[in-house]
Amino acid sequence: MTFAPRTWVVGEVVTAALLNAEIRDQFLSFFGAWTSDTPTWTASTTNPVIGNGSLTGRYLKVGRTVHRVVDLITGSTTTYGSGTYAFAMPAAAGSATNQVGDAQAVGGSSRYAGHILITANSSTAACYFPDSGLVPVSRLSTMSPTIPFTWASNFQMRACITYEAAS
């Protein structure tokens, strides 16, 4: 909710409503509850479909700072599409923003640590994980139906990022 402060004019009568809007409500927005949502999950070629899996998100926007969490749990009817994956962010990134957050993918007995990246002026972010098919394994590749592993039912991905929004 935070926004640019009011420009006061000489002789203006300060009311309780103005003080509440300009001070109290602005202050409270710094400590507000996170907003829950369902991020859009897309792929560069054919979009995946969550089916009976779970895709949830939540975010907190304070001024132009956005904190975003994405949780993905695949189900038995999830289809994985084709191409590299991206997840919608609640606000477009600013023009000087290239921000990196943390991501983890868990499937079977494998756990991969990776990153989530939002680039300048983008409204989506992509996750990057080590591609076990490449040497060296420390090289990161964009999350896809086969990266960091071949996705299957009950596999999970969680990502958290903080970035500067365009507005």
Image (cartoon, helix red, strand yellow):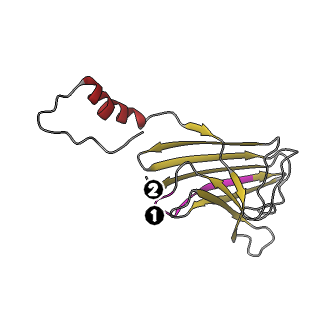
In the rendered image, the residue lying farthest to the left is 11
Choose top left, top right, bottom left or bottom right for residue 150. Answer: bottom right
Identify the residue shown where x is 22% and y is 42%: 7
The foreground one among 102 and 9 is 9
Task: State yes or no: residue 36 in magenta.
Answer: no
Describe the element under mark 1 as helix, strand or loop. Answer: loop
> What is the x, y in percent for residue 3?
36, 43
Question: Callout 2, which amino acid?
Answer: Ala
Q: Are marks 1 and 2 in contact (CB under 8 Å)?
A: yes
Identify the residue shown where x is 16% and y is 39%: 9
The foreground one among 50 and 30 is 50
> What is the x, y in percent for residue 57?
63, 43
Identify the residue shown where x is 19% and y is 39%: 8
Q: Which residue is mark 1?
A: 95
Residue 80, placed above or below residue 9: below
Question: Callout 1, which amino acid?
Answer: Ser
Q: How many marks?
A: 2
Task: State yes or no: residue 96 in magenta.
Answer: yes
> What is the x, y in percent for residue 101?
57, 56
What's the distance in space between the residues labelled 1 and 2, CA to CA?
A: 7 Å
What range of the chain is rendered magenta?
Answer: 93-105
In the rendered image, the residue lying farthest to the top is 16
Q: Which residue is mark 2?
A: 166
